[in-house]
Amino acid sequence: MPPRDTAHSMIMAESGINNRWIGPAVMAVAALAALPGWGASLTAKASDASGNPLADAVIYALPKAGTPIPARVPRPMAIEQKDREFVPYVTPVQAGTTVNFPNRDPLLHHVYSFSPAKSFEIKLYSGDAARGILFDKPGTVTLGCNIHDWMIGYILVVESPWFAKTGSDGRALIGEIPAGEFEVHLWHPTQRAAIDPKPVKLDARTSAELEFKIDIAPRKKPFKPMLDGTRYK
């Protein structure tokens, strides 16, 4: 039997692996594994008062003292107007995010908000708006259309980069959270009252799962008239 080092070299040669890349590759993986937040994730499950899965709920993690928020440049987002509705209905963004409002309908829209977190309007336009809107203050922003009264949408602006929105199964996943202590919040546009955040402590390899139950008012579909061929309706 060849010496151990010789046997190792033979196996590496037969497998086509170049020895000179092994050390750097292992070191790179080890360095990534040592980074704060490598592999850490948080799953939240939201349900209504009857225990049914709740879609369009936003979960976000705010760090407690001692867990800094890393400097990040939020990527631009888009909320479309399609079939005379805002799509998506709920959009979570980090403060400092620019949101565009492309009009995909063959008619004009006039998007506005009077919310304290962001007041703005984009007057009658089609296609891409002339400018995006910067959402730089945390809070809830309610969207409307000055032409179509039934159109409503929501933006939740949060300070944290760690957020997600629940799907039809009521679940949301936040990945790559750094080690530390957090308060996890849940928000829904039709909630009857705010709910208390849940504390969670994460280390570099923690995966946590939280459950929230929230009392909401049923979402009522407002009357939307059929298109009559006019320019604005």
Image (cartoon, rainbow, N blue to C red):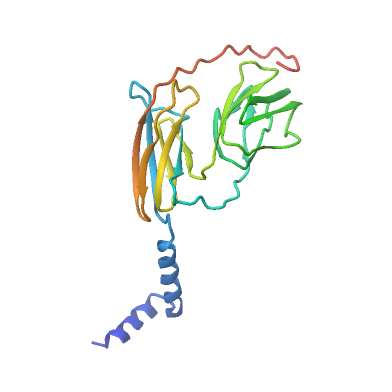
Residue 170, horizontal then vertical, whole percent: 40, 31
Viewer-closest of 45 and 105: 45
Q: In the figure, 183 relative to 49: above or below?
A: below
Residue 211, horizontal then vertical, whole percent: 34, 34
Left or right? Give the position of 110 relative to 41: right
Give residue 106's quadrant in the image: top right
Q: Quadrant of the N terminus?
A: bottom left
Residue at 41% from the left image edge and 71% from the top image edge: 26
Is there any visible trace of residue 188 in the rendered image? yes
Left or right? Give the position of 142 relative to 19: right
Residue at 47% from the left image edge and 39% from the top image edge: 164
Residue 13, horizontal then vertical, whole percent: 39, 80
Viewer-closest of 23 and 181: 181
Is there any visible trace of residue 83 in the rendered image? no
Q: Quadrant of the C terminus?
A: top right
Q: In the figure, 9 relative to 133: above or below?
A: below
Residue at 37% from the left image edge and 78% from the top image edge: 12
Residue 76, horizontal then vertical, whole percent: 63, 43
Viewer-closest of 122 and 202: 202
